Amino acid sequence: MSTQLATRLVEFVEALRAKGVNAGPSESIDAADVMRVLGLDDRDLLREGLAAALVRRGGQRDVFDQTFDLFFPVGVGRPEAAREAGEDLDVQQIRELLLMALLDRDPRTLAQIAEIAVDVLGEVGQPGTDTAGWSAYQTIDRLQPQTLIAAAMAMRPGGGTGQGGQGLGTQFTDRLARDEVRQGVEAFREMVQAEARRRSAELRGRELVARHAVRSSRDRVDFLSANRQQLEELRRSVQPLARVLATRLSARRRRRRRGKIDMRRTLRRAMGTGGVPMKPVFEKPRPNRPELVLLCDVSGSVSGFSSFTMLLTQALSAQFSKIRVFAFVNAMAEVTEIVRDGAVSGGGDIEPRIRAEARITKWHTSSDYGEAFLDFQEFFLDAIGPRTAVLILGDARNNNQNPRFDALHEIAMRSRRTYWLNPEHHTRWGLGDSEALAYAEIVPMHECSNVEQLTNFVTRLLPV
Amino acid sequence: MFNKGTMPFTSVADVKARLATAGYLASDAVATTVFLASELGKPLLVEGPAGVGKTELSRAVAQACGAELVRLQCYEGVDESRAIYEWNHAKQLLRISAGHDESWSEAKSDIFSEEFLLPRPLLSAIRNDGPTVLLIDETDKADVEIEGLLLEVLGDFQITIPELGTVTATQRPFVVLTSNATRELSEALRRRCLFLHIEFPDADLERDIVALKVPELDQALTDSLVRVINALRAMPLRKAPSVSETLDWARTLVALGADTLTPEVVSESLGVVLKHQDDIDKARTKLDLDAVLS
């Protein structure tokens, strides 16, 4: 392999590492092997091959793809399509092209239009200076692709694809068509962003663009600042985690517990001692159904986090039946039913319902953990038994009220295990009105501000 | 180091063609990774939602290359004696009581020989002389200790049996590990594998898959079927329908003799695709099935 190519590969791996894909030297060697075997002729194959060697888990693929596009770009400079189309296209013409491509659902044409659009509409700053670059935002803003959805729907030929003019059938695929066009627009948006990154990278250097313009991997999105679309993506990664979390919390695996004798394994072991069963082997105890109690802070200061909290609770309650969910700002209220309904109807927004139906505030609207714990102790303490695991989700910012450590202590004592997940960075615990450090002395507290940390908590920190 | 590929693939296109003859339509990602795993002699770790053909892939590779498929199904509590080998204690006891007047060393060397060994999947895959595909299914279900065991076996492709010596693979098997990610596999194991995340196939590929597996279904219906499936996957369901559900649905439609996809047909057969009542309710609302029917 040429030194130049090797250098490029190493830079690529470094950029990935900066984005949280932890690829080490052994991965780099694998990647080099991949290049040797596949050659550089087919870019798509190379992409898949390098992904196999460098990406080790799902959820990192987006970051990989974006970085790959920067380090192994399709071409250099103005793309072929833009050169052919020339400068004479205006916004309206590009919109018309885009409309046709959306109707055809052809990704190749979409990609070409994205290249043209960035070339014609996306240039920002003074050419030749530091400000020069290509902006995806400006391109999208001028092009307004989302306004094309209605137009595309209007232009759709009546019967959809091969539905034969039957009345009901036509309507049925029409229902899907709108979503499909919307997905097309979404895909186009991604392509414009990728193209803008590529063009900018040529001007400003790959490393710089990779550092700033490539979105962090889904695992690292901060709950507190996640936007709507990211929350939607989080939902997907949280679902399997919730399952693991619930089983982990419920797992009771004391070995050699008295119980049913496993005849097969006892006899097999007895063979080793001449047929005399010296040591009985017990069947592994079945994992208990989880008894899980969740206490969730849903106040405004942790709004991003509480959306995530609700995601997690919904995922958990869909998974398991013995779970009770309580929400609080400064009063504790049970919301198990609301969460369960929400999980069934699938409407992500159960927060408004909680605000409307549950009594989560008293005379003021700022969060008060002490008061909420006290409430819990008074009204719901019987929800916690010796087999219950309690999970508290919140930032422990108490607004300088009485933190009531005794109430939390009581909860922790009665439960089998209690954990606290805090969305704040641990360096900020105990600063200002945060009681995190004091609470952390009573129950184990873990920083949990993104999926990566949640995964870590679920898979490593929770004892089995 | 094995420089020769473990499987007789010559190129990515060749992988695709061979898998197709075995009835498995591979996407670029799948074909490339399989080719690399074979060329580099590395195990292949496959993750992805249930029912996208993770297990099917190894079956297809085995069939395409005329290799033997050895399968180790992992579950909680699987241990060395189920994964690698076990001595046939009962037979050993019989042998000892049968030969009364022989010396201890004779008996010892006899009862710890091939005849009394019960090879389990890992050992039989390594001892196999011909080409072998070793499938370690649902690796995440096994306990963490088994991973350590796998590291040793997959690293050197050799197994040491204290009484018999070390068994080394004459031909390195093509190893496929599958995981549903219910547990995070250890970094060390991931490190040794090539990683492949199989997603739901794109619309074109899925159409081809349906056409291959359920040729009775006509073109137009296949088209709308795949579109509805894709719409369902975009919904926040507990269990999104995967390829196997698509095929089940296609077969159901053939059985029902449906020629167009009407709301009635969809409504009747939705239970084939979605396995939870909540999901069915959700899909009904989103697709407006009830509104049309009433």
Image (cartoon, coloured by chain):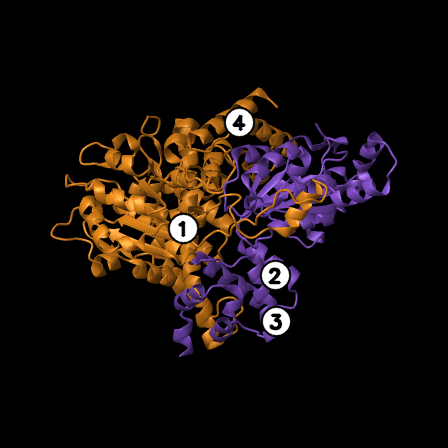
The answer to whether residue B91 is left or right of residue A368 is right
**Residue in the picture at 32% in, 52% down:** A384
Q: CA distance from mark 3 to mark 2?
A: 12 Å
Label drawn at residue B254 = 3
Chain for numbered disc 2: B
The residue under label 2 is which amino acid type?
Val
Residue A181: % across, % down: 42, 57
Q: Quadrant of residue A433?
A: top left
Position in image of residue A179 (x %, y %) = 41, 59
Chain identifier matching the purple colour in the rendered picture: B
Q: Are marks 4 and 2 in contact (CB under 8 Å)?
A: no
Q: Which chain is orange?
A: A
Identify the residue under disc 1. A186
Asked if the residue under mark 4 is in contact with the one under mark 1, i.e. CB atoms within 8 Å, the reply is no
Q: Callout 2: 10 Å neighbours few (<14), some, many (20+)?
A: many
Q: Which residue is mark 4?
A: A9
Amino acid type, callout 4: Leu
Determine whether B136 is above or below A158 in the image: above
Pointers 2 and 1 in contact (C-beta within 8 Å): no
Q: Earlier in the sequence, mark 1 or mark 4?
A: 4
The residue tagged 2 is B210
- The residue tagged with tag 2: helix, strand or loop? helix
* Residue at position x 77%, y 32% in the image: B164
Across and down, in percent, residue B266 comes to 50, 71
Q: Nearer the viewer, residue A403 or A304?
A: A403
Mark nearer the viewer, 3 or 4: 3
Percent of width and height locating residue B227: 50, 62
- The chain carrying label 4 is A
